[in-house]
Image: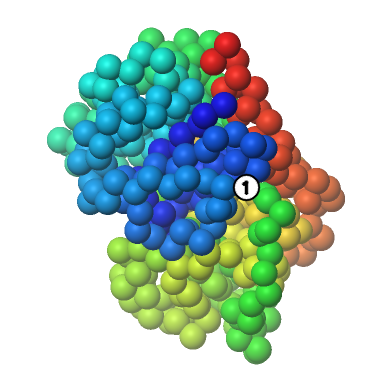
């Protein structure tokens, strides 16, 4: 098969890393594999396998890559064009229309809980993207959601998407080259070591996390929280930590490309998102055998944790409940079979699911 994977850039997002994992897997199986980047900048360049052919359109915005993508589809005509992230999905479907290509199958991937994600946009963006998505998504050959919650939300928003047109395939999080040795990210005097990972954006609801940790810190003065990630809320969150008088017990690392190497140093992983599509880092925390506390947000965490079997689920935005969950969870050993659960999301297992789907569409 000739498979082309389309992503916006190589910046530090979960979608980008998961698509690179898939592209590398398909290339390793002997398939002709292209990775199309609307903008080739970012920190994940070194993760791309040599067998993957990279096409960099060098565009600052997704829509600016429409012409180049249409020309690519006309010239190279891959069997499958697989795109990820809603604004890129729209470009992929428009590009096929303008290219005149009627042989390439378009498979789009929804990576987030679309209703919650669009609700965070301004009114004009919400209106524009809602109309484009509702119109264009049914024109794809297949839509893949990265959790059952994502797919259920899509069916509500876009009635034209039928069950045969829509499918859940989880993210390929675990691979054989995840781990590396890095210095300790926690100070030597740290007692209980708590860690989280994700972009510093409203979706992750780090204010609730800081409030919960501040409450826990009142009872455990040596506890230390590490936040892996970068984003535009960096300064406000650091100011909030100062206001809560926990700045000496909170470390902001900035972007890291191997979060699992840091996770395995901790006692507890915590995730306080207001919404998700899946949440790759929970799988990595399972792989490390950590105690886990996560919000029961739409959608992904409850599916990964099997409704609380592998970790504690808390209400969204409830710092007191999260503090209680931290205290209670740390008195227990991590649930059994966590690593085995994480391996359900190994790239070999997920890659086979994608391969079967692509082969069926081509046939």
- Single out the residue that lies furthest toward the right: 336
What residue is drawn where x is 52% and y is 29%?
2
Left or right placement of residue 57 versus residue 47 in this view: left
What residue is drawn where x is 31% and y is 70%?
236
Q: Quadrant of residue 121?
A: top left
Residue 143 visible to an observer of this rendering: no
- Single out the residue that lies furthest toward the left: 124
Label 1, secondary structure: give it.
loop
Across and down, in percent, residue 155 comes to 44, 18
- Single out the residue that lies furthest toward the bottom: 189
Residue 98 visible to an observer of this rendering: yes
What residue is drawn where x is 55% and y is 53%?
50
The quadrant of the rendering that contains the N terminus is top right
Across and down, in percent, residue 205 comes to 42, 55
Q: Nearer the viewer, residue 8 or 345?
A: 8
Q: Quadrant of residue 78?
A: top left
The quadrant of the rendering that contains the C terminus is top right
Q: Nearer the viewer, residue 170 or 214?
A: 170
For disc 1, the neighbor class at 10 Å (few under 14, some 14 to 19, many from 20) is many
In the rendered picture of this protein, how many numbered marks are placed on residues?
1
Q: Nearer the viewer, residue 163 or 313?
A: 163
Across and down, in percent, residue 209 comes to 48, 62
Across and down, in percent, residue 246 comes to 47, 80
Residue behind mark 1: 173
**Colour basis:** rainbow
Left or right placement of residue 326 versus residue 93 in this view: right
What residue is drawn where x is 63% and y is 27%?
355
Q: Nearer the viewer, residue 4 or 228?
A: 4
Left or right placement of residue 127 versus residue 195 in this view: left
Q: Is residue 260 above or below residue 86?
A: below
């Amino acid at each position: 098969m000739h498979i082309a994977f389309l992503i916006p850039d190589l910046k530090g997002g979960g979608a980008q890393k998961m698509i690179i994992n898939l592209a590398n897997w398909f290339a390793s199986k002997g398939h002709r594999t292209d990775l199309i980047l609307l903008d080739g900048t970012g920190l994940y360049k070194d993760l791309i396998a040599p067998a993957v052919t990279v096409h960099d359109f060098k565009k600052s915005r997704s829509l600016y890559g429409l012409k180049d993508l249409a020309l690519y589809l006309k010239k190279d005509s891959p069997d499958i064009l697989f795109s990820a992230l809603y604004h890129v999905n729209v470009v992929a479907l428009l590009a096929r229309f303008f290219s005149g290509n009627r042989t390439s199958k378009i498979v789009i991937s929804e990576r987030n809980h679309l209703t919650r994600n669009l609700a965070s946009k301004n009114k004009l963006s919400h209106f524009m993207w809602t109309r484009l998505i509702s119109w264009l998504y049914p024109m794809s050959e297949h839509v893949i959601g990265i959790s059952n919650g994502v797919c259920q939300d899509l069916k509500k928003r876009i009635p034209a998407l039928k069950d045969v047109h829509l499918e859940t395939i989880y993210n390929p999080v675990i691979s054989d080259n995840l781990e590396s040795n890095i210095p300790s990210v926690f100070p030597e005097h740290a007692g209980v070591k708590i860690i989280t990972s994700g972009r510093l954006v409203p979706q992750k609801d780090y204010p609730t996390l800081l409030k919960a940790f501040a409450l826990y810190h009142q009872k455990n003065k040596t506890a230390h929280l590490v936040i892996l990630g970068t984003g535009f809320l960096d300064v406000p969150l650091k100011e909030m930590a100062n206001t809560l008088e926990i700045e000496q017990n909170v470390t902001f690392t900035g972007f890291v490309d191997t979060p699992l190497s840091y996770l395995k140093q901790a006692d507890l992983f915590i995730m306080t998102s207001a919404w998700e599509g899946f949440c790759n880092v929970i799988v990595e925390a399972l792989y490390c055998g950590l105690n886990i506390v996560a919000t029961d947000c739409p959608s992904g965490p409850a599916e990964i944790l099997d409704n609380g079997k592998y970790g504690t689920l808390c209400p969204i935005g409830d710092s007191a409940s999260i503090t209680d969950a931290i205290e209670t969870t740390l008195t227990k050993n991590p649930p059994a079979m966590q690593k085995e659960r994480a391996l359900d999301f190994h790239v070999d297992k997920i890659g086979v699911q994608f391969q079967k789907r692509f082969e069926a569409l081509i046939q």
